[in-house]
């Protein structure tokens, strides 16, 4: 029942049959995760760039905390966001619990430290490379950070992909704040968790296979775009 | 660090205004007793120099002499532990910092087109940029044909010419060059020297660090010779190449290995 | 720098538009905190379309353990709670978190275990005796351990045996701390005994060596109750729509809908709302 061949063909038949529910789950997964990664980049990349660029007291501690937060357990983040968004929590009035927005918030919190830490690592080398030039040009701090981010755009796309990988694969946070409500907040990972707990391991694995395929496709797309841009443009 | 230098010395409204440029004079530049240490090692040892307007000063000396550090200290990239720098008598301020540019041994080009590299400096200095202006800058560097090419895919000579064009885009009154031809072939070296010459005719003070004695002879009006962090002599070019005062300089010009007795005893 | 600003602007626009995309146009919905057994057996999938067709109200099910469902209700994160742990439900109402408890339906728990039956309990109708035998044989037993309704029921059955399962935890007694499905997966994997509600068992597909070994004991009765979350405590509760659902499910139509839900010709839940 659960041999690889039959799982593969089950996954294939699910995709080919054009199952409406499957497609809406895939679309929601991508929408939630891509938005979360985008938000994570908007915050994480400038944060990483600032940490790569400036020396200030407590910087070492900030980097250590950031690196530790790369491994934040999704359930802990989910729980914290749940307590914030719960009707009894400080942001309860917004009524965001059990909505895709809540899932986006949780995943954004999950991936921001990862993206920031990886951005810092990749921009630190670039900062060493360009520090003399930028100081010679008397760049303002904000210009320095923007220039550094643009110079590091290829390396930063890898950081964004790492964030995507973490978010698309996690179940602990979205199942708590989303509630895994059918047609509303059910995404690939929560659907897999559900099928697993129904004991339908073949279906769960087939969904897992589809999820992995999507993740590979997204990675391949970004990396090949990256390579083309790099070759055509600015080495 | 740089910001601190500028902030503490920004107020100097009483300096006389140069009639031509509309800005206060910045020459001569004088360093007094400039000393830099790193973990007990003396990297710059009481460097006192006077750099006059309009001349091409070449700094020479063996590796580790402190040539680049001297350049970087005057340019405001590092802060010496002791000593001071004055510009026509006034301390370093935002005005003098904005009127100088530096070309490094590595071109340090941005990962964008040649044109975008020029536009970047113009914009970051708050200048308006136009295609015409940038075309002119690229044409003078004989780079107009590669304007749209990725800067970091240009040849070594083209890259260094672009780096110089980028430094000259802001029309500095003072141009530092730190071994700009170290990795270039003879033809590219001459092209770079040609650009340096045009910058000088446009009125820029040139301060060049080089190991190339032939280049020093072609360019220098005056020569500073350094060894082990100290200035051993500062002479007119003709006098220096004819008969250097120190035995270290003599050995250096003759291509002999010279061990500084003072350095080994320290 | 222009490209950078452009990229930033595009990113911001995408982020904002994605965030502001309406979840769904229809705002007429309620959130029901319920249990995995009702959701995973497919009961809701069977009956909710009938309710929606009649009232236009969407019912969003958050399926968790009874303990967590009640906790979420206490916090106001839901309009209705439908669970199966009578004592806890009565406390929920007594503490003012729920308005009124109404019984909806029942089914029963069954003890499942490996075909090899190391504790020799198969065919018994005495759950307490069976648990005693399992403990004596030190045969592996997988417990929910998650404060769910099933977990509470299981602990109630251990009580008369006088066996302290806590001290056996980690040896033959395995507390999985997870839902019914994952616990059954674990039991199947380690050939352990486990207590499960019949609905989940019937819809469960990864049975492995497991089969029902004890059923039919009156004490294995499993009653479900429904409560409206108290709007006086949480003004955001959609009291009208929530009460409409409660009235429907405990009324004739809802009760018939529950009765009509079958898996493999077997009825999973037995409606027993008062006065129907």
Image (tube, coloured by chain):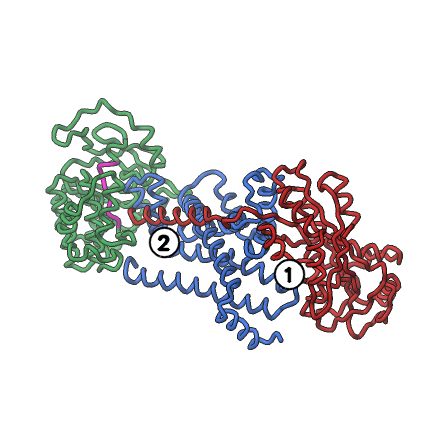
Circle 1 Cα neighbour tier, 10 Å, few/some/many (<14 / 14–19 / ≥20): some
Q: Quadrant of residue B45?
A: top left
Disc 2 designates what residue? A153
Q: Which residue is drawn at 72% across and 41% down?
A: C99
Q: In this view, does B191 lie to the left or right of C1?
A: left
> At which x and y percent is residue A112?
49, 49
Q: Which chain is blue?
A: A
Disc 1 designates what residue? C46
Q: Is residue B54 left or right of residue A210?
A: left
Asked if one can make out residue B37 in the rendered structure from this viewpoint, the answer is yes
Instruction: From this view, report whether residue B8 is shown above or below residue C107.
Output: above
Q: Is residue B189 left or right of residue A151?
A: left
**Dot 1: chain letter:** C
Q: Which chain is red?
A: C
Chain B: its colour in the image is green
Q: In this view, does B189 lie to the left or right of C252?
A: left
Callouts 2 and 1 on one subunit: no
Residue in the foreground of this view, choosing between A163 and B265: A163
Residue in the foreground of this view, choosing between B251 and C259: C259
* Tag shown at residue A45: none
> At which x and y percent is residue B5?
33, 33
The span from disc 2 to disc 1 (Cα, nearest Å) is: 51 Å
- Numbered range of the magenta stretch: B98-104
> At which x and y percent is residue A57?
48, 38
Name the secondary structure under disc 2. Answer: helix
């Amino acid at each position: 029942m659960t041999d690889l061949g039959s799982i593969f063909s089950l996954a294939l038949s699910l995709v080919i049959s054009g199952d409406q529910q499957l497609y809406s789950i895939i679309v929601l997964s991508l929408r939630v995760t891509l938005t979360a990664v985008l938000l994570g980049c908007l915050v994480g990349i400038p944060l990483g760039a600032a940490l790569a660029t400036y020396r200030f007291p407590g910087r070492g501690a900030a980097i250590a905390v950031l690196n530790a937060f790369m491994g934040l357990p999704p359930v802990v983040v989910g729980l914290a966001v749940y307590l914030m968004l719960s009707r009894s929590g400080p942001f309860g009035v917004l009524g965001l619990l059990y909505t895709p927005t809540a899932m986006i918030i949780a995943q954004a919190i999950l991936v921001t430290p990862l993206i920031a830490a990886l951005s810092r690592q990749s921009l630190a080398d670039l900062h060493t490379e360009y520090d003399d030039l930028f100081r010679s040009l008397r760049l303002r701090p904000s210009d320095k950070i923007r220039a550094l981010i643009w110079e590091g755009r290829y390396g930063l796309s890898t950081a964004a992909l790492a964030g995507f990988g973490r978010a698309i694969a996690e179940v602990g946070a979205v199942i708590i704040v989303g509630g895994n409500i059918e047609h509303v907040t059910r995404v690939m990972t929560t659907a897999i968790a559900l099928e697993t707990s129904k004991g339908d391991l073949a279906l769960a694995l087939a969904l897992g296979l589809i999820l992995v395929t999507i993740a590979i496709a997204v990675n391949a797309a970004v990396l090949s775009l990256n390579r083309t841009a790099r070759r055509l443009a600015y080495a | 660090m740089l910001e601190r230098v500028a902030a503490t010395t920004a107020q100097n409204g009483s300096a006389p205004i140069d009639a031509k440029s509309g800005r206060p004079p910045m020459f001569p530049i004088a360093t007094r007793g400039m000393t830099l240490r790193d973990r007990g090692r003396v990297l710059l040892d009481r460097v006192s120099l006077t750099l006059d307007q309009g001349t091409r000063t070449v700094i020479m000396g063996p590796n580790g002499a402190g040539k680049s550090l001297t350049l970087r200290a005057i340019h405001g990239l590092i802060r010496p532990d002791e000593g001071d720098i004055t510009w026509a008598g006034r301390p370093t301020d935002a005005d003098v910092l904005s009127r100088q540019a530096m070309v490094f041994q590595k071109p340090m080009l941005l990962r964008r087109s040649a044109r975008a590299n020029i536009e970047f400096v113009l914009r970051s200095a708050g200048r308006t940029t136009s295609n015409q202006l940038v075309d002119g800058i690229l044409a003078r560097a004989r780079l107009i044909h590669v304007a749209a090419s990725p800067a970091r895919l240009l040849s070594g000579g083209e890259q260094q010419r672009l780096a110089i064009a980028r430094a000259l885009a802001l029309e500095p009154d003072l141009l530092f060059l730190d071994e700009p031809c170290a990795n270039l072939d003879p033809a590219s070296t001459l092209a770079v020297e040609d650009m340096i010459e045009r910058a000088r005719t446009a009125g820029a003070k040139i301060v060049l660090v080089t190991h190339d004695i032939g280049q020093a002879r072609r360019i220098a009006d005056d020569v500073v010779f350094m060894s082990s962090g100290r200035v051993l002599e500062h002479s007119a070019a003709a006098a220096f190449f004819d008969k250097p005062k120190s035995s270290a300089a003599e050995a250096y010009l003759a291509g002999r290995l010279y061990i500084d007795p003072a350095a080994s005893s320290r | 720098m222009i490209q950078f600003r452009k990229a930033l602007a595009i990113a911001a626009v995408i982020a904002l538009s994605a965030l502001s995309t309406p979840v769904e146009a229809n705002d007429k919905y309620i959130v029901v905190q319920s249990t995995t057994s009702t959701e995973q057996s497919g009961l809701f999938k069977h009956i909710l379309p009938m309710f929606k067709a009649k009232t236009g109200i969407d019912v969003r099910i958050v399926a968790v353990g009874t303990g967590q469902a009640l906790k979420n209700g206490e916090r106001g994160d839901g309009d209705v709670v439908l669970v199966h742990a009578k004592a806890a439900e009565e406390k929920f109402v007594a503490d003012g978190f729920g308005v009124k408890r109404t019984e909806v339906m029942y089914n029963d728990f069954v003890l499942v275990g490996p075909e090899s039956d190391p504790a020799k309990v198969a065919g018994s109708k005495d759950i307490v005796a069976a648990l005693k035998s399992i403990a004596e044989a030190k045969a592996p037993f997988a417990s929910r351990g998650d404060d769910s309704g099933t977990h509470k029921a299981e602990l109630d059955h251990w009580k008369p045996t006088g066996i302290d399962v806590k001290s056996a935890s980690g040896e033959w007694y395995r507390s999985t701390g997870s839902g019914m499905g994952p616990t059954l997966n674990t039991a199947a994997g380690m050939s352990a005994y486990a207590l499960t509600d019949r609905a989940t068992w019937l819809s469960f597909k990864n049975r492995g060596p497991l089969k029902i070994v004890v059923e039919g004991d009156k004490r294995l009765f499993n009653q479900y109750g429904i409560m409206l979350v108290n709007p006086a405590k949480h003004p955001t509760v959609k009291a009208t729509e929530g009460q409409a659902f409660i009235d429907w499910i405990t009324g004739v139509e809802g009760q018939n809908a529950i009765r009509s839900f079958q898996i493999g010709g077997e009825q999973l839940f037995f409606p027993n709302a008062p006065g129907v």
